[in-house]
Image: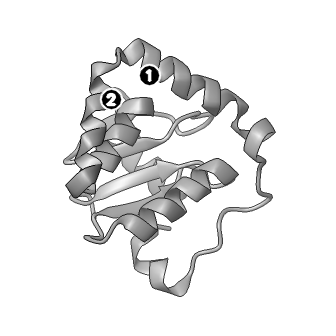
Amino acid sequence: MNNHNIVFFDGYCILCNKFIDLLLNIDKNKCFYYTPLTSNYAKKILENLDGPKIEVKNINTVIYLKNQQLFFKSDAVIEMINELGGCYKACLALYLVPKKVRDWCYDLVAKNRYQIFGKMNHCRVIKQEEKYRILE
């Protein structure tokens, strides 16, 4: 499973779950697998990657693992959307915006996501057709 593109997300955040729902619907090539940051699978993968160790406690960002490379915050979102191909590749133009500005905007939303969009009491319910793409 380590060779797949994996999206690590906040399973309790309504905004994050809506983004995952969107990706599941528009990812026609089925190039992503998903796991909540609170899962044992996420902990095992993220804490055992080569490079700086990542503790999954209190992570306030989406993380995207692509070809054994980690992307965080706005880079993760841009890379995920780009992976969809076609017209979605236009999102690469967002790399023209300085990373500091992109990540400041990302952090602003991430910091306020529960107040704005709400928080679920439990992780998302997995639909039957999604089961093989949700890791743990």
Find disc 2 in the rendering and name its residue. Answer: 94
Spatial CA distance of label 2 from label 1 is: 8 Å
Q: Is residue 38 left or right of residue 131?
A: right
Q: Is residue 122 placed above or below 103 in the rendered structure?
A: below
- Residue under the image location 53 percent in, 64 percent down: 21
Label 2, secondary structure: give it. helix
Which comes before the other along the chain, label 2 or label 1? 2
Q: Are marks 2 and 1 in contact (CB under 8 Å)?
A: yes
Q: Residue type at mark 2?
A: Leu
Find disc 1 in the rendering and name its residue. Answer: 102
Q: Is residue 121 left or right of residue 40?
A: right
Q: Residue 43, how many percent across, how many down? A: 48, 48
Q: Residue 1, how many percent across, how many down? A: 28, 65
Q: Is residue 72 placed above or below 38 in the rendered structure?
A: above
Q: Residue type at mark 1?
A: Arg
* Label 2 crowd bin: few (<14), some (14–19), many (20+), radius 10 Å: few
Camera-side mark, 2 or 1: 2
Q: Residue 99, how many percent across, how many down? A: 37, 18
Quadrant of the rendered structure where residue 76 is? top left
Q: Is residue 47 left or right of residue 3?
A: right
Foreground residue, 72 or 40? 72
Quadrant of the rendered structure where residue 58 is? top right
